[in-house]
């Protein structure tokens, strides 16, 4: 799925930003931090579709975690007194790290920020890392939400994506964390994979539903330049699915999951009532957050900052890039993130935050989408019905202020 303004890089996912490195500097957050993201960029094996910053050299896991503690200390001014509500360990593969090491980062952040217990602490895990021993040790940490990178319950699809686990191993991994007492589990799935739609996708979704997890993130496969899949596509060895197929598969995902009681609350995310991802909500609502680690992004409501160091560079001392968002940029991001969620955007809020003229421009631009039923208006709120969120990109792009 394509996102206007490369939302996937800048807002929704934490990645390494290309470009010239800037000297180290500290941006003090103008708002209080909603959450902290810890980026663990290591992977045992690189997935065929992945274009995020990552490293397969696991020798540096320990040194990197120590360097992340140093970065936390160096940026203590951005944390002091902040009511940190969520913590998120993403990657990469955080489950390659010892649970005790992840808890060490939690304790370091707590000492610097002075918060007590958070509302949510998520750890991304690969199924094959979730051994009985690992899960037991993870239960002794503050992790209370696990995001398990399954991607598919079809072994052929898993081999195509160069995943390490089998479908059966993924099922057992989820059951293992459930038996251990984790009651907030998310599973990642991917659709839009040529040759693995139809019955294969339906079986994958049914398997996820049978497991009874609380949250599902279901992403459309993207073919990115520089990835193994991108190179196959350039050679003509792989052809992305058609727009029609994308729409059909999106509809299947939506119909099966909502019929099972999941709220389709963001274009790629479904949750049972009470189990929406709290950390990710900060990205979608424009709240400030702090990113720690190579490739991690931070945002204070006006300035976006990212660490563009490789692991080796980061160990010597991180470098950062940044961009300041003006009112037009912030309004565009408000539209971009809001219209990907069930809540949509508020014209009244837009007027207060970005000026009455920008709100009127949005209202004028929305007219044709309202007429077609792609947008719905409820008072001052504009939103895309969840069943039609696949076309959110087109709506968003049309409402952007150039």
Image (cartoon, helix red, strand yellow):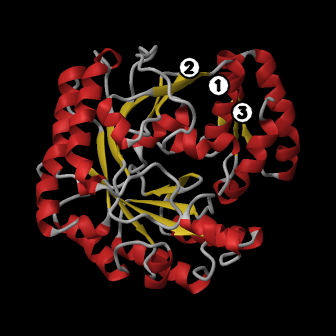
Reply above or below: 83 against 38.
Answer: above
- Are dots 1 and 2 in contact, CB under 8 Å? yes
Reply above or below: 21 against 374.
Answer: above
Discs 3/1, front: 1
For the C terminus, the quadrant is top right
Q: Position of residue 325 (x, y in %)?
A: 63, 21
What is the spatial separation of the Cα atoms under label 3 and label 1, in whole angstroms?
23 Å
What is the spatial separation of the Cα atoms under label 1 and label 2, in whole angstroms?
8 Å
Q: Which residue is mark 1?
A: 330
Image quadrant in which you'd find residue 27 = top left
**Nearest the camera: 350 or 258?**
350
Discs 2/3, front: 2
Q: Position of residue 149 (x, y in %)?
A: 39, 63
Q: Which residue is mark 2?
A: 302
For the N terminus, the quadrant is bottom right
**Nearest the camera: 60 or 158?**
60
Q: Which residue is mark 3?
A: 379
Taking the image as shown, residue 152 lies to the left or right of residue 355, namely left
Q: Position of residue 382 (x, y in %)?
A: 71, 38
Residue that appears at 55% across and 72% down: 256
How many numbered marks, from 0 up? 3
Q: Secondary structure at mark 2?
A: loop
Image quadrant in which you'd find residue 355 = top right
Mark 1 is surrounded, within 10 Å at the Cα level, by few (under 14), some (14 to 19) or many (20 or more) other residues, namely: some
What is the spatial separation of the Cα atoms under label 2 and label 3, in whole angstroms?
28 Å
Q: Which mark is residue 160?
A: none
Reply above or below: 287 against 262.
Answer: above
Residue that appears at 35% across and 35% down: 314
């Amino acid at each position: 799925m394509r996102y206007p303004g490369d939302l996937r890089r800048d807002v929704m996912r934490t990645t390494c930003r290309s470009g010239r490195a800037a000297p180290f500097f500290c941006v003090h957050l103008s708002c209080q931090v909603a959450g902290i993201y810890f980026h663990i960029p290591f992977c045992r094996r690189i997935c065929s579709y992945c274009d995020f910053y990552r490293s397969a050299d696991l020798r540096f896991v320990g040194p990197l975690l120590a360097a992340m503690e140093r970065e936390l200390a160096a940026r203590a001014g951005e944390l002091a007194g902040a009511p940190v509500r969520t913590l998120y360990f993403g990657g990469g593969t955080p489950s390659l790290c010892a649970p005790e090491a992840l808890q060490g980062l939690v304790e370091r952040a707590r000492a610097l920020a002075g918060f007590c217990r958070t509302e949510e602490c998520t750890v991304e895990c690969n199924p094959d890392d979730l051994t009985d021993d690992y899960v037991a040790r993870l239960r002794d940490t503050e992790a209370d939400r696990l995001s398990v990178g399954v991607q598919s319950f079809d072994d052929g699809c898993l081999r195509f994506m160069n995943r390490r686990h089998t479908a059966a191993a993924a099922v057992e991994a989820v059951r293992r964390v459930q038996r251990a007492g984790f009651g907030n589990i998310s599973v990642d799935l991917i659709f839009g994979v040529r040759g693995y739609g139809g019955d294969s996708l339906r079986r994958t979704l049914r398997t996820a539903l049978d497991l009874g997890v609380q949250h599902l993130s279901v992403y459309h496969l993207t073919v990115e330049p520089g990835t193994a899949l991108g190179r196959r596509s350039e050679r003509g060895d792989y052809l992305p699915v058609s727009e029609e197929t994308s729409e059909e598969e999106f509809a299947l995902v939506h119909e099966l999951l909502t019929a099972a009681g999941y709220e389709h609350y963001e274009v790629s995310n479904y949750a049972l009532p009470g189990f929406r991802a709290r950390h990710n909500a900060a990205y979608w609502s424009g709240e400030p957050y702090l990113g720690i680690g190579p490739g991690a992004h931070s945002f204070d409501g006006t300035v976006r900052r990212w660490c563009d160091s490789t692991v080796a560079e980061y160990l010597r001392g991180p470098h950062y890039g940044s961009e300041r968002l003006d009112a037009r940029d912030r309004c565009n991001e408000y539209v971009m993130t809001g219209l990907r969620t069930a809540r949509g955007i508020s014209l009244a809020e837009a007027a207060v935050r970005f000026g009455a003229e920008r709100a009127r421009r949005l209202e004028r631009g929305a007219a044709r989408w309202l007429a077609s039923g792609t947008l719905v208006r409820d008072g001052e709120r504009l939103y895309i019905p969840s069943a039609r969120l696949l076309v959110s990109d087109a709506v968003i792009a049309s409402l952007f202020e150039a």
